[in-house]
Amino acid sequence: MFRSIKQGWFSNIKGDSLAGIVVALALIPEAIAFSIIAGVDPKVGLYASFCIAVVIAFTGGRPGMISAATGAMALLMVTLVRDHGLEYLLAATLLTGGLQIVAGYLKLAELMRFVSRSVVTGFVNALAILIFMAQLPELTGVTWHVYAMTLAGLGIIYLFPYVPVIGRSIPSPLVCIVVLTAVYMISGMDIRSVGDMGELPDTLPVFLWPDVPLTLETLWIILPTSVMLTVVGLLESMMTATIVDDLTDTPSDKNRECKGQGIANIGSGLLGGMAGCAMIGQSVINVKSGGRGRLSTFVAGVVLLIMVVFLADWVSQIPMAALVAVMIMVSIGTFSWASIRDLKKHPISTNIVMLATVAVTVGTHNLAIGVFVGVLLAAMFFANKVGNILYIGSEEADDGSRRIYRVVGQVFFASSERFGSAFDFKETVEKVTIDLSRAHFWDITAVQTLDRVVIKFRREGTEVELIGLNEASATIVDRYAIHDDPAAVEKLMGGH
C-alpha cells in the first residue's frame, strides 16, 4: 500500500506541482465561463472546480486526470436553474453524485468496451474543434494587441522547450502565462483580462445543505437533470480516461473513477458548487506539462482556491490572450492529425463513424449525442459485416433422396433473412439434414427463422434433422424454438 501511495503521489513531485499550477491558471476563466452558461454566480463554478479536483485526486481511478466544472455539464443545468433556482441545482448535484456511485458499483464502466476506436477518435477530434471554437469570441472584434499577445504566447509555448537547461524543466504554458501577464501589467494595454470575466470570490467555501423540501415533488423536479448529468459526466470522464491512458501508456480503474466522480460531485454540492466531470482539455494540459500523478490534480484544486481567494488581485491581471494561446495549444495537441492521413487507408465504414461522431458532436455541442450516434453507426456496420459472413452449401446424398445443408457463420437478426432464403423448399427429397456444427445462433430472431425453415420443410412432407448445434446455440434453440411443439406450430400457422 505504501508503495502504491508513493507511486501515485510522490513519484513526480516537481512535474506534478508545476503542471498543477498551469492547470489551475487555465481553470479559472473556464470555471467562470461555465458558471455564466449555467446561469449561476461565478463562485459556484470556482468552488466546484476546487472541490472536485481535490476530492477526485484521492478517490479517482485515473491518476493525472483533471476533473472540474465543465461546459458539457453546464449546458444541462440551464433549464433547472432558470425555473427553480440555485438550491435545486445543488440538490441535483448531490443526486448526480449518488447515481454515479451506484453506476460505479454496478460496473457500468464496462460498457466502454462497446465504444470503438473510431468513435474515440471522433470524440477527440470534435472536442479539439469545440475547444478551438470556444476561443473565437476572445479573438473576434478585438484590437491588434490581442492577436499579437496570442501569437507571442503560442511562440513561447512551442519554442521555450528548445531553450537549453530550463526549457524542459519548466512547463512552457506556465512561462507563457507569467510572461504575458508581466507584459500586460507593464504596458497597460487595453485588452480583456481574467478580472473582466466576473468577480472572483473573496471567502473560502462553507458546508451547506440545499434549502429544498425533501419531498417526492422535489425528486421529480431534479431527477431528469440529475440523470442527464450522470450520463454525460460519466461518458465524458470515461472517454477522457481512455485518452489519458493512451497519452501516458498506463491503465486506469474506470469503475473506481465512476465512484470517485460521484463522491467528488457530492462534495461539490455540499460546498455550494455545481456538478462536474473530467475535462479533456485540462487533462491534456496537465499531461503535456509533465503531470502524471494524483498530486498534479490535488495541486490544481488547491492552487485554484488559493489564487481566487487570496491572490485575486494578481490573478485578475492575467490577460485572456495568454489563456487563449494555451487552449489553442491544447486543441492542436488534442486533435488526432493521424486520423486525417488514415482516411485513405481505413475502411469507409470506419471513416463514416469517425466523421459522423465529429459532425454530430460539433453540431449539437453535446458529447453524449455525438458518442451515441457514433456507437450506433459502429454497431450497425459491425452487424452488417458479421451478417454477411454466412455461407450455406448443400449436397445430395443417398441416391437423391436426402440433401445435406452445411451452415457456416453467425446467425442473428442481421443474417437471419439470408439464412432463411438459402433453402430450397420445393425440392422433392425425403429427408433434409441441416449441419450446424460450424454455425452459431445468437438471438430469438435466429431461432424463429430456424423454426420457419423446419416448419416449411415439414409442410412439404420432408423430414428434417438438425445436427451439430454447439452447446450455447442448443441452449437458446431448446429454450425458444417451437418446431417440435405441435400446438405452438398450429398456433403459428394460424390453425391451417
Image (spheres, helix red, strand yellow):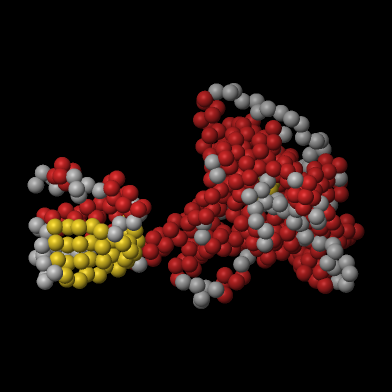
Question: Is 390 displayed left or right of 246 in the figure?
Answer: left
Residue 326 versus residue 48 in the image, above or below:
below
Q: Quadrant of residue 410?
A: bottom left
- In percent of width and height, residue 378 lies at 45, 60
The residue drawn where x is 86% and y is 42% is 310
Q: Nearer the viewer, residue 234 or 219?
A: 234
The residue drawn where x is 59% and y is 23% is 213
Q: Quadrant of residue 341?
A: bottom right
Q: Nearer the viewer, residue 210 or 493?
A: 493
The residue drawn where x is 29% and y is 50% is 477
Q: Nearer the viewer, residue 186 or 20?
A: 20
- In percent of width and height, residue 103 lies at 56, 41
The residue drawn where x is 17% and y is 67% is 403
- In percent of width and height, residue 164 lies at 88, 72
Quadrant of the drawing holding the N terminus: top right
Question: Is 76 displayed left or right of 322 in the figure?
Answer: left
- In percent of width and height, residue 209 lies at 68, 27
Q: Residue furthest right?
A: 186
Q: Residue furthest bottom?
A: 344
Q: Does residue 251 appear in this view?
A: yes
Residue 85 versus residue 183 in the image, above or below:
above
For the image shown, how many numbered marks are present on the structure? 0
Question: Is 478 displayed left or right of 381 in the figure?
Answer: left
Question: Is 213 displayed left or right of 24 in the figure?
Answer: left
Q: Residue furthest front?
A: 398
